[in-house]
Amino acid sequence: MSKNITVYTNDPNQKILTLELKAFIKQSIYLSRKSITLQGMAGQTITQSIEVKAGEDKPLILKPTFFDLDQKVSYQIEEIIKGKIYKIHFTHKPGPVESYSGSLTLETNFLKKPQIKILIWGNFTAN
């Protein structure tokens, strides 16, 4: 994270200073992105993925608790490095022209981030 601060001084040679503050904020869980957009032509199969990384020194456990797009989208949780890195693959099931939105909620075993919610949008148009 980076922030700039403007400081006004009474120094005649340098009335305004800009200070930059930088910090690394350690998170419990890192997401490569917070949402997925599946788009293409009606009838196509489209897949997008999100990477989930543990930011704590203990193994991360993910447990699906809510998914409201099972008629339109399938998902698969792939464990890349045991307890550390996961990939969640979302695949649009071929269908008609349509737009939709929904989400997948995952429960975690980390107290600082007990839940992850991934938003999902779909937009499929005519050829």
Image (tube, rainbow, N blue to C red):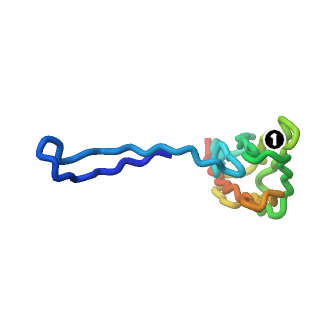
Whether residue 81 can be seen here:
yes
* The residue positioned farthest toward the left in the image shown: 12
Q: On screen, 98 above or below 92? A: below
Whether residue 91 can be seen here:
no
Q: Which residue is mark 1?
A: 84
Q: Residues within 10 Å of mark 1 (few under 14, many from 20)?
A: some
Quadrant of the snapshot with the C terminus: top right
**Residue ID at (21%, 47%):** 16
* The residue positioned farthest toward the top in the image shown: 80
Location of residue 78 (image quadrant) = top right
Q: Position of residue 96 (x, y in %)?
A: 71, 51
Q: Position of residue 30 (x, y in %)?
A: 68, 46
Q: On screen, 49 above or below 100? A: above
**Residue ID at (42%, 48%):** 3
Q: Nearer the viewer, residue 127 or 114?
A: 114
Q: Nearer the viewer, residue 61 or 67?
A: 61
Q: Position of residue 14 (x, y in %)?
A: 17, 43
The mark total stands at 1
Q: Secondary structure at mark 1?
A: loop
Q: Is residue 50 left or right of residue 21?
A: right
Q: Is residue 125 left or right of residue 109?
A: left
Q: Nearer the viewer, residue 94 or 18?
A: 18
Location of residue 32 (image quadrant) = top right
Q: Is residue 27 left or right of residue 54?
A: left
Three-letter code, disc 1: Lys
**Residue ID at (66%, 58%):** 100
**Residue ID at (84%, 63%):** 65
